Image: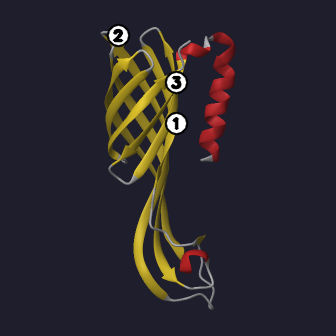
């Protein structure tokens, strides 16, 4: 997530001297894969450029560990997975109210096992036993309800179905 913040701040710094702040906005949403998404976007004529990220909420217990010490608890409490992505999208606005967009996502997916051990916060820890770099593609639609507020629906091969809202910074 630090990389996402750095990329978005860099993009904002590069573009801000050349544009009016009222062409910017933010998005937030929820996804069927128990994840949340957010981005910033920039509008130029009918072209919309998005940059953001998503994070999957998980049931991972306590601290994240990549190796287990001999004195750690051995009783398992279930397996799980979690991912985060960095997302870039391009959209085009039709009829002044409808945006169609495509997106590309890259990120990391972790697979873990929860272990019970009362010496840790949340009564245990989770041991990551595998992680993969992931990439995906997606598409979506947004509809402008007011000049400042939009709703959107999307599908992404990693995150699956998502819904959310967008706020434009208009004077």
Residue at figure coordinates x 59%, y 41% from the top left: 4
Mark sitting earlier along the chain (2/3): 3
- Position of residue 11 measured from the top left corner of the image (x, y, whole percent): 63, 26
Dot 1: element: strand
Residue at figure coordinates x 62%, y 11% from the top left: 19
Q: CA distance from mark 2 to mark 3?
A: 16 Å
Q: Say which mark, if any, is on residue 52.
A: 1
Which sits in the foreground, 111 or 164?
164
Report the residue that reaches farthest toward the bottom: 71
Judge depth for marks 2 and 1 and give the one in front: 2
Q: Quadrant of residue 98?
A: top left
Judge depth for marks 3 and 1 and give the one in front: 3
Q: CA distance from mark 3 to mark 1?
A: 12 Å
Residue 1 vertical placement versus 97 (above, below) = below
Drawn side of residue 103 relative to residue 7, left or right:
left
Q: CA distance from mark 2 to mark 1?
A: 24 Å
Residue 2 vertical placement versus 40 (above, below) = below
- Position of residue 164 measured from the top left corner of the image (x, y, whole percent): 38, 36
Residue 80 vertical placement versus 24 (above, below) = below
Q: Quadrant of residue 161?
A: top left
Which residue is disc 3 drawn over? 25
Drawn side of residue 160 relative to residue 81, left or right:
left
Residue at figure coordinates x 56%, y 12% from the top left: 171
Q: Say which mark, if any, is on residue 96.
A: 2
């Amino acid at each position: 997530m630090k990389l996402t913040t750095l990329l978005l701040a860099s993009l904002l710094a590069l573009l801000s001297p050349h544009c009016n702040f009222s062409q910017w906005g933010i998005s937030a949403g929820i996804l069927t894969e128990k994840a949340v998404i957010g981005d910033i976007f920039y509008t130029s004529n009918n072209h919309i450029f998005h940059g953001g990220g998503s994070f999957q909420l998980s049931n991972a217990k306590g601290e994240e560990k990549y190796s287990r010490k001999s004195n750690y608890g051995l009783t398992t409490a279930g397996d799980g997975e979690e991912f985060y992505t960095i997302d870039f999208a391009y959209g085009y606005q039709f009829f002044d109210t409808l945006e169609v967009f495509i997106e590309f996502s890259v990120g990391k997916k972790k697979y873990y096992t929860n272990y019970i051990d009362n010496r840790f916060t949340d009564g245990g820890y989770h041991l990551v036993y595998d992680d993969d770099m992931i990439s995906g593609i997606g598409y979506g639609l947004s509809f402008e309800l007011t000049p400042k507020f939009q709703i959107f629906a999307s599908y992404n091969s990693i995150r699956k179905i998502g819904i959310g809202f967008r706020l434009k910074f208009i004077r």
